[in-house]
Image (spheres, helix red, strand yellow):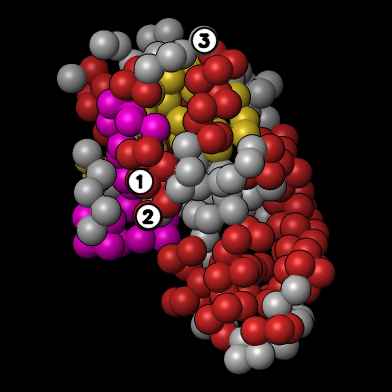
Amino acid sequence: MSVKLVVFDLAGTTVKDDNDVSKAFQSALKNYGYEIPLDLINPIMGYEKNEAITKMLHTHERDQSKITPELIKSIHKEFVEQMIHHYQFADGIEALPNAEGTMAALHEQGIQVGINTGFSRDIAEAIVSRLQWREKNLIDYLVGSDEVEQGRPYPFMIHKMMKEGGIADGHEVVKVGDTEVDIREGQQVGCKFVIAVTTGAFTRAGLEEYHPTHIVDNIAEILAIIKG
């Protein structure tokens, strides 16, 4: 069964990230009194960010009664504002090496390209607009974690793209990402290949624990994998 859709993550997979996402997440939490080191934040950055905030609060707040929907919403709002400003105005916002070329090569082969993310849609739009991926005709779909009932590791973001693209079988889809939840998402969909990249939050050893079908150091390597 041939591949019809390849779904990529954003930060750490196709977009350069020098811990900018984790630092914004850390800053938003700090503004509400929670000082959490980056090494504890990085592993959960693939999650939908309200869920990631909830996980951090349940770990670091002794008084669980303080963890209210209002608190989570406020921290998330702070994070979103920081991220949108960052992706709109910061220097050095760029695609990772070979990411755009890989997307273009997939299109040349008649394969659709999707982007999904643990970010909400407004942050994802800021990134895609800054990099002009629609203008460059590099992507067919963009789905934020707030557009479905549950974000990664649940399969709903990919299912949304599959429905829009008329794809019925997960074995016609490939998932590419840099985190645990990217891998688990692809596995839940039943993707033909679940490819992990070492350009983001996890080391090769850290990725191996979750048993992707492949681990690559260069995103361009997925072209040979798909071609078989």
- State which tag comes first along the sequence, 1 or 3: 3
Q: Secondary structure at mark 3?
A: loop
Q: Is residue 136 above or below residue 36?
A: above
Label annotation for residue 16: none
Q: Residue at 50% of width from left, 54% of height from top?
A: 46
Residue projecting furthest to the bottom: 62
Residue 83 in magenta stretch: no
Amino acid type, label 2: Glu
Q: Is residue 183 left or right of residue 211?
A: right
Q: Which residue is nearer to you in this view: 162 or 175? A: 162
Q: Which residue is nearer to you in this view: 64 or 57? A: 64
Q: Is residue 61 left or right of residue 153?
A: right
The residue singled out by tag 2 in the image is 180
Q: Secondary structure at mark 1?
A: helix
The residue singled out by tag 1 in the image is 183
Cβ atoms at labels 2 and 1 below 8 Å apart: yes
Q: Residue at 50% of width from left, 20% of height from top?
A: 162
Label annotation for residue 166: 3
- Cα gap from disc 1 to disc 3, whole angstroms: 23 Å
Q: Secondary structure at mark 2?
A: helix
- State which tag comes first along the sequence, 2 or 3: 3
Cβ atoms at labels 1 and 3 below 8 Å apart: no
Q: Is residue 16 above or below residue 82?
A: above
Rendered location of residue 35, percent (x, y): 62, 87
State the quadrant of the N terminus: top left
Q: Which residues are magenta?
A: 189-208
Amino acid type, label 1: Ile
Q: Residue at 62% of width from left, 69% of height from top?
A: 54
Q: Is residue 87 above or below residue 82?
A: above
